Image (tube, rainbow, N blue to C red):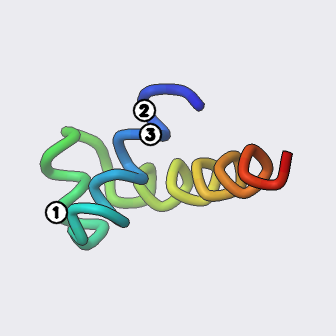
Amino acid sequence: MPVHHRAVLVLRELEELDERSAAKVLGIAPGTVKSRLHRARSAFRKAWQQ
């Protein structure tokens, strides 16, 4: 999983930050957090099932 996807996943799921707070930490737009999170969750599910 790419680092930028992993960072969003960790901030949202482990650190329990909301999208706006995660966006601030990473210096990106909240919409970018949302799209990266979607891709990260999909990649995680796919890897977990293998």
Task: Identify which residue is drawn at 42% across, 53% down.
Answer: 9
Q: Of the residues shown, which amino acid type is indicated by label 1?
A: Ser
Q: CA distance from mark 2 to mark 3?
A: 5 Å
Q: In the rendered image, which residue does mark 2 sit on?
A: 4
Q: Residues within 10 Å of mark 1 (few under 14, many from 20)?
A: some
Q: In the rendered image, which residue does mark 3 sit on?
A: 6
Q: Are the residues flagged by discs 2 and 3 in contact, CB closer than 8 Å?
A: yes
Taking the view exactly as shown, the residue that stands out farthest to the top is: 2
Q: Give whichever of discs 3 and 1 has the lower sequence position.
A: 3
Question: Residue 19: image x %, image y %?
Answer: 30, 67
Q: In the rendered image, which residue does mark 1 sit on?
A: 21
Task: Identify which residue is drawn at 82% across, 54% down.
Answer: 49
Task: Identify which residue is drawn at 60% across, 59% down.
Answer: 38
**Nearest to viewer (mark 3 / mark 1):** 3
Question: Residue 7: image x %, image y %?
Answer: 35, 40
Nearer the observer, 34 or 48: 48
Task: Identify which residue is drawn at 74% across, 44% down.
Answer: 47
Relative to residue 17, is residue 45 depicted above or below? above
Taking the view exactly as shown, the residue that stands out farthest to the right is: 50
Disc 1, SS: helix
Q: Of the residues shown, which amino acid type is indicated by label 2?
A: His
Nearer the observer, 22 or 49: 49
From the viewer's perspective, tell me whether residue 38 is left or right of residue 30.
right
Q: CA distance from mark 1 to mark 2?
A: 15 Å
Quarter containing the N terminus: top right
